[in-house]
Image (tube, rainbow, N blue to C red):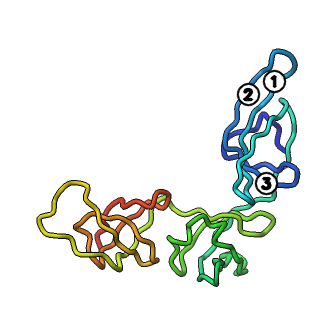
Amino acid sequence: MYSTTDFKRGLKILLDGTPYEIVEFQHFKPGKGGAMIRTKLRNLLTGRVVDNTFRSGEKVGRPDIEHSAMQYLYMEGDNLVLMDLSSYEQHYMSTEKSAGAENFLKDGQEVKVMLYNGDPLSLELPAALIFEVTHTEPGAKGDTVSNVTKPATIETGLEVNVPLFINIGDKIKIDTRTREYLGRENS
């Protein structure tokens, strides 16, 4: 059990049988009575954000959440097929829960997976990954205006904007949170 004194951003709590993550919290003391804590909670199952107020000292449950190292195997319809690296058990995760992470997954890639009651809930990717450019138009010679970009398709099929000097076969680093080009990697 957690007490309201344990609250911090990112803490996972169990409220009415549903796992939530604390997005924001604020202590306040009304004119009369005890202190209260206002929170914004994100439902880990649906992604909805709700407001809730707790009395100081109130207890909430601790959800059965664990993090596990898994390997991405392949896509099957709208599901990602993941293999637990410790038990070799296969798990299926819908692309709705992956929040776009499937655009950065290569076959055999290792990822951290958050599990709730043994079912995959979300994926944690590194902040930046390196990909090979599979398709892009050639840049026009002499077109050197700063910050000019062109679309490029990477090996997973995702399209990102890259500078004009990037060519097919180049390895580039991409920010997985913003989907932005970070730089070219030497191969």
Front-lying residue, 43 or 74: 43
Question: Which mark, residue 27?
Answer: 2
Question: Which mark, residue 83?
Answer: none
Label 3 neighbourhood size at 10 Å, few (<14), some (14-19), many (20+)? many
Q: Which comes before the other along the chain, label 3 or label 2? A: 3
Q: Are marks 3 and 2 in contact (CB under 8 Å)?
A: no
Q: Amino acid at mark 1?
A: Ala
Classify the position of the C terminus by image quarter.
bottom left
Count of numbered circles in the view: 3
Q: Is residue 59 left or right of residue 77?
A: right
Please say if 63 is above or below 72: above
Tell me the quarter of the picture where residue 41 sits.
top right
Q: Are marks 2 and 1 in contact (CB under 8 Å)?
A: yes
Residue 5 image position (x, y, % from top left): 78, 33
Question: Which mark, residue 19?
Answer: 3
Q: Is residue 144 left or right of residue 166?
A: left
Where disc 1 sits, the SS reads loop
Residue found 85% across the figure and 22% down from its top = 34
Question: Which mark, residue 35?
Answer: 1
Please say if 185 is above or below 47: below
- What is the distance, in whole Å, between disc 3 and disc 1 at their CAs? 24 Å
Classify the position of the N terminus by image quarter.
top right
Residue found 65% across the figure and 76% down from its top = 85
Question: Residue most toward the left?
Answer: 142
Q: Amino acid at mark 2?
A: His
Front-lying residue, 128 or 147: 147
Where disc 2 sits, the SS reads strand
Front-lying residue, 127 or 104: 104
Q: Amino acid at mark 3?
A: Pro
- What is the distance, in whole Å, between disc 3 and disc 2 at their CAs? 22 Å
